[in-house]
Amino acid sequence: MFEIIFLVAVSLYFIQTIIFTIGLNKTFSKLSENQLPQISVIVAARNEEENIFECMTALDGLNYPEDKIEIIIANDHSTDSTEKIIRDFIKDKPRFKTIIPVKGEGNLKGKANAIDKAVKISNGELILTTDADCSPNPEWAKTVALYFTKDVAMVSGYTTQYERNLFEAMQSVDFVYLLSVAGGVMNLNKPLSCIGNNMSYRKSVYEEVGGYNSVKFSVTEDFALLMAMHKLKKYKIIHPVDKDLFVISKPCKNVKSLFHQKKRWGVGGLQSETAGFAVMTSGWLSHLGILLLPFFFSATAFYISLFKIITDFFFISPVYKKLALKLNLKHFLVFEIYFVIYVFLLPFIVLTNKKVIWKGREF
């Protein structure tokens, strides 16, 4: 019985992976460079003294016409030296501006409030967001903007992380895997997730859905906004696999911070639609089967487990190639161990306690 259930779960997992791959292989039309629109890049920063200088340095190096770009750093009431670092950096850089957002009401809390206040003072037709611990590549802004043909409301891109040790490497592979799943279904008009550190949208569509003030508050505000735009049923939301649409971020430093990140994402995922829960269920059952393998060991069950792992490898390998990255086999195997454990545990963690701690705030 165990083998049959395990085989069915992994078969569904494999079928879903094929669907994700079909979505990732979609291509999209682009504007010509003489059609580049006015853009506003927004970063919400709270207590980011360790990261904000590197982020602003990368943003300062963006290849985009000077008269068509502004960069807004929203200092979300930092209590460290973030404010001074920002002021010192931007004092002779006219493309930059900074604000300290006034306290929001209703759904406007934390990062959502900071971004909303920045959007309100922005001049761009497009809003590009990234995080203070991220460094976009020089072609990022231009590549994002070129994908905004007239029927596109949102463009999501890939983020990976530094890989200076195995702990960081497994997080990096995890990011690429999760964003490949999200991108695959997004390109098939069934968005399940996105990530705010590489997310862009039309300001007019943001205003059409009422912005974060009208979107039900979520600890994953980027996902909430994605779903609000998707529900309009009027625009395309796309996730191209493009090496120039790429951001690199700093990974969680320790298990505690990684735990809080995963829990925040898990709590946000409770707002998923039926398709999202179906994807999560097949993954959970497949990983449960691998964890139970020592107790119900058989050659058949072992090969089913191996098939699941091979499926993951051949799913993300082409993505790494398109992004001009190298997938290290050792890093992948460590990720698989981590992946099996956290996917199994996350539902129990989220359903027993939905409290989220993020950036020194409790939600």
Image: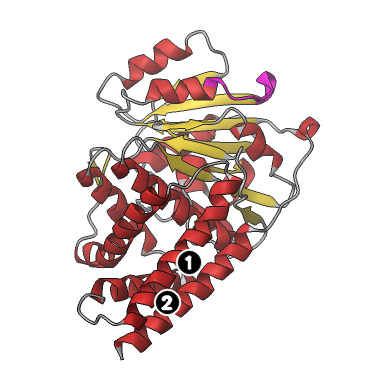
- In-front residue for pair 137/88: 137
Chain part drawn in magenta: 60-68
- In-front residue for pair 155/165: 165
Check disc 1 and report the residue beneath it. Answer: 311
Q: Residue 88 shows which numbered tag?
A: none
Question: Could you tell me which residue is drawn at 37 percent across and 53 percent down?
Answer: 218
State the count of labels.
2
Question: Could you tell me which residue is drawn at 53 percent across and 50 percent down?
Answer: 210
Residue type at numbered disc 1? Thr
Determine the residue located farthest toward the front in the rendered image: 299
Residue 241 located left or right of residue 261: right
Q: Earlier in the sequence, mark 1 or mark 2?
A: 2
Check disc 2 and report the residue beneath it. Answer: 10
Question: Is 88 included in the stretch rendered in magenta?
Answer: no
Residue 178 located left or right of residue 1: right
Question: Is disc 2 surrounded by few (<14), some (14 to 19) or many (20+) residues within 10 Å?
Answer: many
Residue 64 located left or right of residue 56: right
| Looking at the image, residue 38 lies above or below residue 185 | above
Question: Could you tell me which residue is drawn at 52 percent across and 19 percent down?
Answer: 96
Residue type at numbered disc 2? Val
Name the element at disc 2.
Answer: helix
Residue 250 seen: yes
CA gap, disc 1 and disc 2: 10 Å
Question: Is disc 1 surrounded by few (<14), some (14 to 19) or many (20+) residues within 10 Å?
Answer: some
- In-front residue for pair 261/299: 299
| Looking at the image, residue 15 lies above or below residue 31 | below
Cβ atoms at labels 1 and 2 below 8 Å apart: yes
Q: How is the image coloured?
A: secondary structure
**Quadrant in which the N terminus appears:** bottom left
On the image, the x and y values in percent for residue 306 come to 39, 70
On the image, the x and y values in percent for residue 284 come to 34, 71
